[in-house]
Image (cartoon, rainbow, N blue to C red):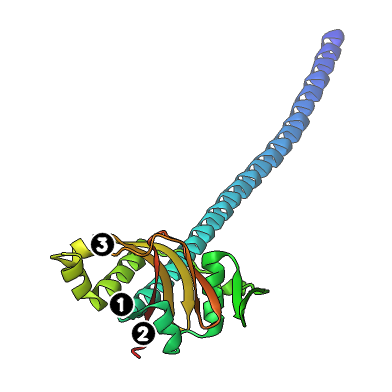
Amino acid sequence: MRMKGQIRKWLTGVLSLAVCAGVFAGCGGNGNSVDNSEQEALRQQIAELQKENDALDAETERLQVENEKLSEEKEELETIKIIASSFTYSLREAYEKSVLDENALMCIAYYDLGSVQRAEGEDVVPVDFVPPSEQAPAEFGEETERFIKSAIYENNREVFEEGGGCTSKEEALQTIEIVKNLGEYNGSYVVTVKIDFILVGASVSPYFIGDILFINGGTGEFYVVLSPVKV
């Protein structure tokens, strides 16, 4: 009996130790489990915040692009507004009527010919001149091009109807090609154009407006100045 009691006591001790070990192990395991859960929750929060941040970055970029596009559209609408009510002149007329000044002529020569030359007595000498970067011509959009062509047509309707035999505005616009945009000067736009039925000298020939050298390159192009000013 005494032996049995000792064995039972020993077994009870072992079981108690096992239970305690299990309890402590369970406590430690639960602690790790809690820590892991918190870390996982934190990781998920960080991932969600990162996703939100990425979405905000993408939206900011989209809005910047949209804003730039709206600015360009606004600028083009302002250009169209001017051109829609413009009068057309030749380059010489525009200079002689003070629509364009000599600085504008030098810019136009530079953008069209790549350099500026001036008459000095009987000589032609190069001018050390480069227009400021902000003066550089921008490309026209399709709508602006149409308004330029429309302004040319409206100001020269008889030429298109009698000289070109055009029976409608649309037919007339089809004959006009905008070759180059040479810039905007005090609200006046300068372009070179070709018109199907207007033949410009086929030979290369230099000429002067003021003292600035221009060249008829024999390409059939000629200058048109569109200005809101009637002179």
Residue 99 visible somewhere in the drawing: no
As drawn, the label of residue 84 is 1
Amino acid identity at mark 2: Pro
Asked where in the image residue 181 lies, by quadrant, the reply is bottom left
> Which one is earlier in the sequence, the residue at label 2 or at label 1?
1
Asked where in the image residue 18 lies, by quadrant, the reply is top right
Which residue is label 3 attached to? 197
> Which one is earlier in the sequence, the residue at label 1 or at label 3?
1
Q: Is residue 54 above or below residue 213?
A: above
> Which one is earlier in the sequence, the residue at label 2 or at label 3?
3
Q: Return the x and y of residue 60 as percentages of the image width and height.
A: 53, 61
As drawn, the label of residue 35 is none
Q: Is residue 132 left or right of residue 139?
A: right
Q: Image point 54% across, 65% down: which residue?
A: 113
Q: Return the x and y of residue 4 as percentages of the image width and height.
A: 82, 9
Q: CA distance from mark 2 to mark 3?
A: 26 Å
Q: CA distance from mark 2 to mark 1?
A: 9 Å
Residue 139 visible somewhere in the drawing: yes
Amino acid identity at mark 1: Ala
Secondary structure state at the residue bearing disc 3: loop
Residue closer to the observer: 61 or 115: 115
Q: Is residue 50 above or below residue 88?
A: above
- Residue situated furthest front in the rendering: 122
Q: Return the x and y of residue 189 as percentages of the image width and height.
A: 42, 76
Amino acid identity at mark 3: Phe
Which residue is label 2 attached to? 228
